[in-house]
Image (cartoon, rainbow, N blue to C red):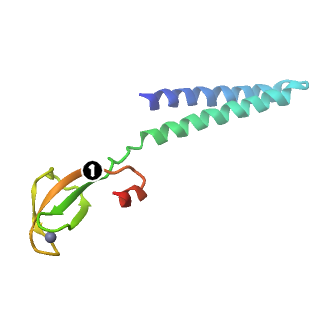
Amino acid sequence: MMGIVSKILGLVFAASGFVLLWWGMGVTGSFSLVWSFIGMFVMAMGFALLTSGRQQKEAKPPPPTVTEIRCNSCDFKEIRDFQKGDYVLKAVEATCPKCQSAMTIEGVYIVREEPEDKDRI
Ligand SMILES: [Zn+2]
């Protein structure tokens, strides 16, 4: 909805800026240059609105989710990408690479978009 509004506003700004620029060029006297500049400015604003509306339309990918798996016997801990069907305390099929014991999902986290945050968990 906002994208459509900014697109219409952008078109209105661009069109009125063009008219102002055109009109400013026809005006004789010292204000001619001022009107032309205002026209260019309004036009630029209109085009900026048009492009910003286009950017808003791009779908944001869902935040990455990770699953924390912990070994039942030792202190081994692994964080991998969330897979469909993962839930806390679910027993995973994979076994611990250190002691071959069964492992359990200890947590499911949503990682913030900054990639460096992934390392902090
Ligand atoms: Zn283990």
> Relative to residue 65, is residue 20 drawn left or right?
right
Q: Residue at x 18, y 62 (%)?
A: 70
> Where the N terminus falls, by quadrant?
top left
Q: Nearer the viewer, residue 23 or 67?
A: 67
- Above or below for 28 versus 110: above
Residue in the foreground of this view, choosing between 3 and 85: 85
| Left or right, residue 108 beside residue 103 | right
User: Does residue 3 lie above or below 94 as drawn?
Assistant: above
**Closer to us: 72 or 64:** 72
Q: Is mark 1 within 8 Å of ligand 1?
A: no
Please state the horizontal and vertical placement of residue 42, each as a whole percent of the image.
68, 30
Numbered marks: total:
1
Q: Is residue 80 left or right of residue 50?
A: left
Task: Left or right? Give the position of 109 relative to 47.
Answer: left
The residue beneath circle 1 is: 109
**Residue type at numbered disc 1:** Tyr
Q: Position of residue 21 (x, y in %)?
A: 74, 30
Question: Dot 1: what SS?
Answer: strand
**Percent of width and height locating residue 109:** 27, 50
Residue at coordinates 51% horizontally, 31% vertically from top-left? 7
Q: Residue furthest right?
A: 29
- Residue 121, image quadrant: bottom left
Residue drawn at point x = 52 percent, y = 27 percent = 8
Residue 92, by quadrant, is bottom left
Could you tell me residue 63's position as x and y percent? 33, 48
* Label 1 neighbour load within 10 Å: few <14, some 14-19, many 20+: some
Quadrant where ligand 1 appears:
bottom left
- The part of the image, by quadrant, that contains residue 29 is top right
**Front-lying residue, 43 or 48:** 48
